[in-house]
Image (tube, rainbow, N blue to C red):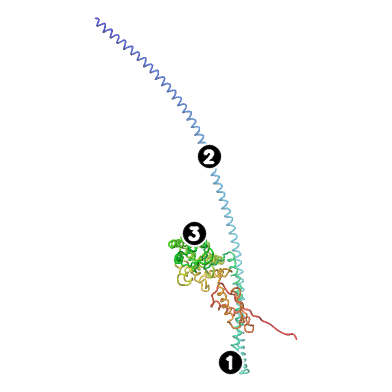
Amino acid sequence: MLLVYLVLAFLIGAVAGGWYFYRRALVQRQHVDEEIKNAAEQEVAQLRRDAEQDIAQGRTEIERLKADAHRILQEAEMEVRAKLLEGRNQLEQEALSERASLRTEREEFRREREELKREIERLNRRAEQLDARGLKLDQLEEKIETDQLQARERLQAAEETLRAAEARLYEIGQLSPEEARERILARLDSELEEEKAVRIRVAAERTSLEAKRRSQQIIAQAIQRSASETSAAMTVSVVAIPSDAMKGRIIGREGRNIRAFEALTGVDLIIDDTPEAVLLSSFNPLRREIARHALESLIADGRIHPSRIEEVVHKAQEDMKVFIHNQGEEAALEAAVLGLKPGLLQLLGRMHFRTSYGQNVLKHSIQVAHLSGLLASELGLDGAMGRRAGLLHDIGKSIDREIEGTHVEIGIHLAKRFGEGAEVLDGIAHHHDPENSETLFGVLVAAADAISAARPGARRESLEVYIKRLEQIEQIATSFPGVETAFAIQAGREVRVIVQPQKVSDARATLLAREIAGRIEQDMEYPGQVQITVVRESRAIDYAK
C-alpha cells in the first residue's frame, strides 16, 4: 500500500513538477515572445522611419531632377534659339553677299556692254578709215604707176646722156673705155668707202650708246647690290715658334725631322735667321695649309719625331677634308645655291686654296654667282640658275693642277658627271668667249666674271708681265698705217691712238678703232676689256697780211 502511495506521490510530484516546468517554460516563452514582438515593433518603426526618410530624400531628388531637367530644357531652348538666330544672320549675310555679288556682276556686265559698244564704234570708225585708206592706196598706186613710167623715160634719157658723155669723155681724155672705167670705179670705191665708214660710225655710235646705256644700267644695279672684299694669297706661310730653341727640335738629329716633314707634306720648310718664326714654301696652297696646321700642332704638343710627324700630318689631312667640305657648304650657302651634290661641294671647298692673279678663286666664284644672279633677275631670267652657273664657272680650277686640260674642259667634264643642266654647262664653257654662247647665261657669267676680275684690287700681276702687256698693246696699235703713236693708260684698260690727220680721215678713224680692237682680241689675253680711243687733230692755219 505504501508502495502505492509512494508511486502515487511520485506521479503527483512528477505531474506537479512537469506542470511547474511547463508553466515556467510557457512564461519564459511569453516573455521571449514579448521581447521578439517589441524588437519587431522597434524594427518596424525604424523601417518606417527609414522609409519615410528615403521617401523624403526621393522627393528631394525628384525635385532636383525636375529643376535640372527644367534648366537643361531652358538651355537647350536658348541654344536652339541662338543657332536659329545665327543661321538667320548667316542666311541674311549670304543673301547680302549674293546681292552684292549680283550687283557687282551687273556692274561688270554693264561696263563690258559699254566697252563692247565702244569697241564696236571704234571698229566701225576703223573700217571707215580703212575704206578711206583703200581709196588713197588706189590713188597712190595709180600715181606710182605714172611715176614709174616717167622714171623709165627719164632713165632712158639719162642712159643716152651718159653714153654721150662717155663718148665725149673718151674723145677729150683720149682714154680707152677700160682705163676710164677703172678710174670711175676707183673713184666710186673711194666715195663708197667714205660713205660706208660714215654709215658704220653713225650706226655703231647709235647702237653703242643705246647698248652702253642699258648695259651700264643693268651692271650698275648689279654691282651696287654686291660687295666683296679683295683677297691675295702668297706662296709662303709664316709659322710662329715660342723660341729659337724650337728650330733645333724641328730640324731633329741629323735633320731627320725636317726631312720626314717635307717628305710627308710636299712643302719646303725653311729655317733661317728670322727670329721666332719658320717659313713654309710651296706653290700648292692646299699642301701649304696642311703643313701649317701640322707644324703648329707639333709645336704645341712638343713631341717632334718622325712617327709623331706622320701621325700629325695624317690627322691634319683628315681635318683638312672636313674643312674643305665646310668651305664648300658655306660658299654654296653664301651664294644661295641649293641642291649641290657632296662631290661638287668638296671641289668648291678646294678652290678656297686656289688663286688666279692673286685673287682667291672661291671668293671670286661667289661674287660672280651674286653678279650673274642679279644680272639674270634684271633681265627677267632665272636668278637661281644664274647664281648656280656663276658659282660653278671656274670649278675646273679646283683640280686643274692635278689632271691634263684647261680649266674650262675640266669644268665641263665635272659638271656633266654631277648632272648639271645645259645653262650651267654653257656658263662654264663660254665664260671666256660669250660670242659662241648658246644661252644667255653664258653671256651673263662672262660679264659677271669680267666685272669681278676687273674691279680695282681684285687681281695682281708681276711688274714684268704688266709692262710687257702694255708694250704689246701699244705695238699692236702702232702697227696700223696712219698711226703716229699710241699710249696705253689706266693699267692697260684703255689705249689712246694718235693718228696722222693727212692719212686718216674722221670716217677712217672709226674703222681703225674697230680693226685695232679686233687685233687685240685675237692676239692678247687680258682681264676685263680694253677701250680703244682714236684721236685725230685737224688744224686750219692762215696768216693776216
Q: How far apart are marks 3 and 1 (CA)?
A: 95 Å
* Relative height, residue 92 to residue 130 (above, below): above
Residue furthest to the right: 545
x and y percentages locating residue 223 in the rendered image: 58, 66
Residue 164: x, y in percent? 62, 92
Q: Residue sitting at 60 percent across and 60 percent down?
A: 111
**What is the distance, in whole Å, between disc 3 and disc 2 at their CAs?**
83 Å
> Does residue 203 appear in this view?
no
Which residue position holds label 1?
179
Which badge, 3 or 1, comes first in the chain's sequence?
1
Task: Count the marks.
Answer: 3
Residue closer to the observer: 394 or 488: 488
**How far across and how far down the image is residue 364, in percent?**
54, 67
Q: To which residue does mark 2 refer?
A: 75
Label 1 – label 2 distance at C-alpha: 123 Å
Quadrant occupied by the N terminus: top left
Measured along the vertical axis of the image, is residue 177 above or below residue 517? below
Tag 2's secondary structure? Answer: helix
Residue 317 coordinates in the image, percent (x, y): 46, 63
Q: Is mark 1 on a helix, strand or loop?
A: helix
Left or right, 51 with respect to 21, comes to: right
- Given the image, on which type of amino acid does mark 2 rest? Glu
Q: Which amino acid does label 3 sit on?
A: Ala
Q: Can residue 220 be seen in this view?
A: yes
Q: Mark 3 points at which residue?
A: 300
Asked which quadrant contains residue 166, the reply is bottom right
Q: How crowded is mark 1: few (under 14 residues within 10 Å), some or many (20 or more)?
A: few
Among numbered discs 3 and 2, the one appearing first in the sequence: 2
Label 2 near label 3: C-beta < 8 Å? no
Q: Nearer the viewer, residue 452 or 382?
A: 452
For mark 3, give the secondary structure.
Answer: helix
